[in-house]
Structures are given as C-alpha cells and as structure tokens.
Image: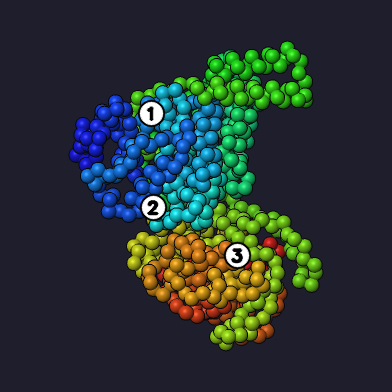
Amino acid sequence: MAEMDVLIGSSLGKYQIVEILGKGGMATVYKATHPAINRTVAIKVLPRAMLHDDTFMQRFQREAEVIARLEHFHILPIYDYGEYEGMPYIVMRFLEGGSLQEHVREGPLSWDRIVGVVAQVADALDYAHSQNVIHRDIKPSNIMLDAQGNAYLTDFGIAKISEGTAQLTGSGIVGTPAYMAPEQSNPGPSTPAMDIYALGVTLFEMIAGQVPFVADTPIAQILMHIQNPVPSLQEYNPDIPVEIDEVLRRAMAKSPEERYQTAGDLARGLEAAVMSAGGWSWSPKTVVHSAQTMQAAVSPRANVPTGEKLHVPELASSKAGHSKLLWSRRVLLWGGLGGIGVGIVVAVVVIVSLLGIGEDSGGAREMAAQTATAARLALTTMPIISSSPVDLTNTVGPTPIVTVPTDSIVTEVLPKPTDIIAPTEFPMTKTLRGVSMTLIPAGVFMMGSDTGYPRERPAHEVYLDAYYIDTTEVTNLYYMACVEEGACEKPLDDNSVSIYRYYGTEPYFNYPVINISWYQARDYCKWRGGHLPTEAQWEKAAGWDEANNEPRQFPWGTLVLDGTYLNYGSEIGDPRAVGTYPKGMSAYGLYDMAGNVVEWVNDWYQDDFYEHSLRENPVGPSEGQFKITRGGSYDDRGAKLTTTFRHALGPATTADTLGFRCAWTTSGDPTGD
C-alpha cells in the first residue's frame, strides 16, 4: 500500500483524514475534518520523499505563500499550511462541486455555465495579475466549483511572482502542454497574456469537450500551439456561431499583443458574442449534432507514418481511457441560455421594443449594457453539484500528423546610410516558426578591435540593414520540430558530456541543441524561413551598445567574468537551459551571446578579411576551408568569450560545445542561400 493511502482514517496534526479527493503529479488531495470546529476541509499533501527535493519544496512553499497574499472571492482560500511528521501540507476550503474538468468530461456544458465560469475565473485572474502574480497553469483541473456552481481558481504551485523568483524547473518550461501559450516555451518574463491564452484553451475545451490541440507527446502538443491555427468550433458543431470562433481566435492568438489585454476583456468579449448570437441562444428547441474531432491538425510533420512517435516521455493518461475525454462518440447539446438568463434577456428585449428605443440611441446602448449585466448576474448562479472525486490529471491521446506552414514576416528595404533614415515600423520582437526573435535596428556600429588578436583588426565602422536574430540559442525542442518534419538531420550524438539522452527528452527541451554541424545549422535556419547570421550581424547583436554608441567587450559590458553572468570555464561542464543568465544579456536583450555554447555564423573564415571587407552589409568570402564560430562555450575562458573573438572550424565539425541561432533580414537574405 502506498504511503499516502495509509493516511485515510488517521490524523494529520489537528485534521482527521476522511478520503482521497484526487491525485496529481505534485501531490495528493484529501478530504478531512477539523473536529474542534466541525469544519470540512481539503488538504494537499506531499509525500515524505519530496522533503529531499529542494525544487519540489520551493514550489510547494511558494503556492502557500502566493495564495496567502491573494484575497479574492474566486480564488480558493487556504486556512493553514505546514509540515507534520515529514509531510508538508496545505489546508484549503473544501468545495462540494468538484473540478471543472470533471464536469467537462461528464458532458457538454450549457452556455450560461460557460459564460459564468469564464467571467468568474477572469475576475480572479485580473486580480492576481494586479498583484503581480501570473498563474501559468490555467486549466479545468485547476478550477474548482462549489455546490452553487461558483468557480474558484486553485493550484498556484508554479505561479510566477513578477517581483522576481528563480526558475523551478531544469528545462525552464513550466505549465501543462495542452494549455501553454506559444511564448511559454521560450525564456523571458511571464506575462498575463500567458494566462489569458490558457483561459482561451479552457473555454475551447468547455465548448468542444476536448482541447484544441491533441497529440501523443508533450513536444508535439507544444509545437502545435506554436505553429497550428486555432481549430474552428464549427468543425465540432456547425451551429456554433462564428462570433464564438472569433473570441477564441483572439484569446489564443500566437502573438501576445494580439490577444485580449485582460482576462476581463476576454470574458466581456465572450458575453457580447453570446448576446449578439441571440438567434440560436433563444431557440425553443435543443439543437443536437454529433461532435467532430480534429484528427487533421495535430503535428508539424506530414510525411511521418501515423503511429510513429517522438521518443520523449508521454503525458499521463486517465485510467478511464481516451473515450472519456474526447466526445467523438457523444453528442453536443446546445440548449441555449438557462431559464433564468432567458427570462431576464427576453424581458429586457420586450421593454426595449415597447419603448421604441432606436438602434443608435444612447438609451439603447445603455439598455444593452444593462441587459448584458443582468444576464451575467443570472448566468453565474446556476448550480452544478457533484460528489465525484477530483481527477487532477490531464489526458491527451494519439493523433495523425500534418505539415504546418512557415510564419511570414513583411519585408521592407531600408534606406542606405547616406540617406535620412526614417523611423521604421518593425516591431521589437517577432516569431518565426514559433521562435522568438529580437529586432536589431538598421544603423552603423563599430566592428572588430584594435587591441584584440590580429584577425580581429582593424576596428571599422559597418552599416547593417535592420534584421531579427533569435533571442536565445536554438533549443532541442525547436530543432526536434525540424527533424520531425524531415527537413533536418538529428544531431550526431544524443548525449552531452555528462547527460544521457540530452537531445530528445523533456527535461532538456529548453537547452541549446548541440553536436550540430554548420550544414545542419544552415538547413534548420532555412527551414525556419531565415538564415544563419552573418559575422557582422552576430557581432552587432552581441556587442554593440546603441544607447551609448560604443562597443562592449562582453555582451553585458566590461565587468570581470562572473558565473552569475554566463556559463563558462568548465564550472558546470555542460550547457544550461537558454535564458538562465539574464544578467548576461546583450544591450539588445539577447541571452547567452557569451558562454553556454559556441555559435555557428554564416561566413567563411579569412584572417585579414576586415582589411578589405565591405562597410555596408558585409558578408564573408565567397569560399573557404573553415566557417566562423562566435561567443565561446561553457568550456571556454578569457578572450574566447569576448564579442569580437573569431574562431574557425571545418563546416562538418560537430561537438558538444557547438550550437547556433538564426537571423532574418528585413531587406532579404544577405547570405545568398
């Protein structure tokens, strides 16, 4: 018998354990009583073994601290937390309604429940965001319901406090793949937009009965969020109004800037869409249609036989099986608004009609607002009662595979340096095949060094057109997508110096891909729709301080080398997750331009190239024996880590210190490939 099971019937401090409510990846939740005050509670308990896992304990303690500082009606409150005989625990309010996930699996939800749950969760999220807390794991199993159907947000175990905290996972990727925003797999600050995206996924699941992207592995699911368009709900039920599709497309936009700016905006958008589609909402008879599953849009690779899988750990599956999650054998029942909501809406519409208020009048607009408010109040009180145990797992199932098109970016040719350079319209960041890139504006910079090695001389002024460059080194996760599509070859070796299966296993998805030749790096960047950066592009991005109009010796400046700025000098002896060293960012906000892994660039090597190279958009010699690498690795020290150091390697070379990043130039590919 497992350790947690023996707790039933025993005491945990002052609490009497009654039964198991559910189990998740991090803890077991029990129903318990506090006899002294006759209160029923829910207790989340970690196993004793987790006391020896510092990361696990940090996450558990953080959840208690985060919830304790949040006071909101729709955030599940905690009563107590601590440790008893080696078992950490959190005591929370007990809710009789179970989790939203249970109700989604039991069958389709009515529109009044969907609108009400989204409104309440959105209100809780906006409050949490106002307190600088990002949840990062919004999903139906983390939304609990009371006996009256009110929703409560719970499980802040991986919440990010904006004031700054250390990462709690080795890979740097946090969240549940089925609900993760595209940018959540990249390093960088957590933002409210991530929670808004996940709320959109949750909304999709409440309507369709399954998540929008279903895959048989975590990586495939993450990549689908990054690359695949949001499926139309009309593929599940053609009677679902197009207005609802529009809400979901905006909530789940690939770019955070294109999403609703607050969770409340999403809730209001949904409410407005429901109200505007009143023709079906008020239908006196129920519309019944068979659900349709999305068996086509599932993976970024088309020519892989169905059933072939990525060799990475699969997500946990429900014992109930795939059919309990997907409604392919069920029907969706769209009965419209609940009786109370219909009564209020119809009553207000009748009043407006009798008063003869015009469509464009201020009175009509005010009345419409009052209608929406009244309907919302009515919709949030419809009861849902369940006594079933809470299932805290999320299930995904196997699916076939298709190709996803490359992202497109608008091309614009900038003026030459002799012209007056007008401000550009280029955004500061862009994604290409889901990978975040940073804009390096057009302009001049000082390349090379008069005090470095002879091959770095002379220092000379160079003009470059505007371009984008990857914010981090290319990771295992994104390189795997190219391999899965058949456009790239696997790394020569799956292992790093000390890590077995460094490539292809989930804990290292967010680590830089290594053991890659120049040819493989070039092919990957071309598959993305970009190119390897030229030597000049790499150096400007790494070492130019545009604000002060001067070069930097190291990406962060001229400070003495320090292990808090970069991974270097064999102190760790292996790569670290990209984005691990924010103190070491370049002036443009790029990570790991020194240390971690050496990076391939496009150009052929020539000792004296700087003496006669072009001063405008220079590209290396047309041929050669060696290609250039830049930036130094986790194994290097000293001058190799400077922004001007040039090293030459044969293009077929592979090593566990070698990686790369890609670029995309606004005026066209300067490399000519």
Q: Which-is-in-front pick, marks 1 and 2?
A: 1
Q: Nearer the viewer, residue 432 or 103?
A: 103
| Mark seen at residue 312 | 2
C-alpha span from label 1 to label 2:
36 Å
In the rendered view of the protein, which quadrant contains the C terminus?
A: bottom right
Q: Nearer the viewer, residue 413 or 6?
A: 6
Whether residue 209 appears in this view of the structure is no
In the rendered view of the protein, which quadrant contains the N terminus?
A: top left
C-alpha span from label 1 to label 3:
48 Å
Q: What residue do we see at 47% from left, 33% from top?
A: 74
Amino acid type of disc 1? Leu
Quarter-wise, where is residue 431 in the image?
bottom right
Q: Which-is-in-front pick, marks 3 and 2?
A: 3
| Mark seen at residue 95 | 1
Q: Position of residue 334 (x, y in %)?
A: 54, 22
Q: Position of residue 661 (x, y in %)?
A: 54, 65
**Disc 3 secondary structure class:** loop
Whether residue 428 appears in this view of the structure is yes
C-alpha span from label 3 to label 2:
34 Å
Q: What residue do we see at 27% from left, 53% from top?
A: 52
Residue lying at the far bottom of the rendered structure: 454
Q: Earlier in the sequence, mark 3 or mark 2?
A: 2
**Disc 2 secondary structure class:** loop
Q: Position of residue 627 (x, y in %)?
A: 54, 76
Q: What residue do we see at 34% from left, 44% from top?
A: 26
Q: What residue do we see at 51% from left, 47% from top?
A: 132
Q: Nearer the viewer, residue 36 or 466?
A: 36
Amino acid type of disc 2? Val
| Mark seen at residue 588 | 3
